[in-house]
Amino acid sequence: MKILYVTFITPSEHFGGGIAILQSLYSLCSFAEVDYVGPEFDINEFQAYGIKPSKIFLVERNKNLLIQGLNLLFRGISTSYYDGWKGITEQLEEESYDCVYLDLTRQDFVLKWAKRRGIPSIVRSQNVEADYFEALYRQQKNLASYIHKIVGKKSERNCVKFADRVAVLTNSDKKRFIELYGFNQSHYPMFPTCVKHFEGSGVEQEKLPEPFIAITGSFWFGPNASGTEWFLDKVWRHVGKTVIEKYNLVIAGAAPNKRIRELANELRNVYIYENPEKIDVYYQKASIYVAPIFYGAGMKVKIAEALSCGLPVITTQHALAGYEAAKNDIYIGETEEQFLEHLETISNLSIEQFEKKRKDIVSVFESNFSFRVSSQILYKIVSDLLQTK
């Protein structure tokens, strides 16, 4: 089986979208011969994930802003990689591919290319783009966000129409796609976020204040920033003696904003680690993981990463989307009182109870959100598609 894999997002373990790309690539390479078309990547990350494409076609970005603007306005193309893609298509052996696989429902021109050549195709959605761009427009209220809203929904509609399968992360995404674009349930197979199990001890630049509760993420990103501010001000400020005497709080990630820094300086036992080179150590050495995310799109990769390390996770109903299989092992809260109660509950577990819980969490992860499971799910999606063609 030979698959043409296309992405216009850089594969990288340093942000959620990049991790999803690595998941797709790993899963495809586990059962098929794969040609990669996409941006330049870190070869060390490919090796770490066991990703071995047969051929690599690197797409160059067009940096001419005028051409980008014209492509957006007159062609409905929102990526600066379009011209690079057009050049690469001349090098592809079209007749050799059994399937085309595209990540993200934004670049309908790839699926149109496949359809014209009679090649079955799959596009993987990381969220419902129509809703994502609508929310972005409501937040920014400018011409650029309005254009992206119109173009984004049109491109997504075409992606759904041209693709033979649209792989979705969650049941709510599937329901929304059917509501917006039609097609039956079988058009939208489930392919949840799965991550590599963190192994080894990681590399830390300085000794971490163990034991600690961890919050990670890109803190320039609205949902992460506002959620962390809320947790510090409304929850950590009021934690009881049991928690504050047992745990520190570690915030690790990119660009913590001014308010997060102010609260960290004001409150007890809070440590910030900005722009760490590797994030794995903050999961491996944590005792509890907190994800105070109240809005946003897609599955939260950080929750799968925490589960892979056996961490009890405290999060919101919103962030649970896609992780329903682990709901019995995840603590759900919507208010500061519920978060405080969950922290107290976990802090009061005996050593034996805590270790048993961690083992149960790892077992749930391995059965539902590991790379092994990811490969099995994607193999079935591709095989089922090809059998119908």
Image (cartoon, grey):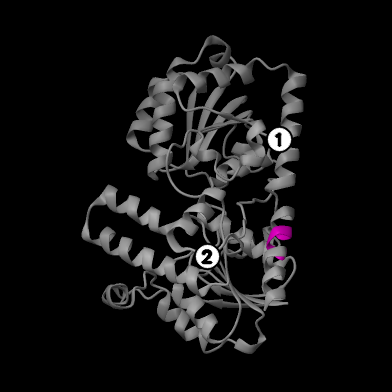
- Residue under numbered circle 1: 361
Position of 381 with respect to 105 (left or right) is right
Percent across and percent down for residue 8 are 48, 68
Percent across and percent down for residue 320 are 55, 39
Position of 385 with respect to 289 (left or right) is right
Asked whether residue 311 is drawn in magenta, I would say no
The residue nearer to you, when weighing 41 against 37, is 37
Q: State the residue at coordinates (40%, 69%).
A: 155
* Picture quadrant where residue 357 is located: top right
Q: Which one is earlier in the sequence, the residue at label 1 or at label 2?
A: 2
Q: Amino acid at mark 1?
A: Ile
The span shown in magenta is 375-379
User: Which quarter of the figure is the C terminus placed in?
Assistant: bottom right
- Using the image, determine if residue 64 lies above or below residue 268: below
What label does residue 141 carry, if any?
none
- Disc 2, SS: loop
Q: Is residue 214 visible?
A: yes
- Disc 1, SS: helix
Q: Amino acid at mark 2?
A: Phe
What label does residue 183 carry, if any?
2
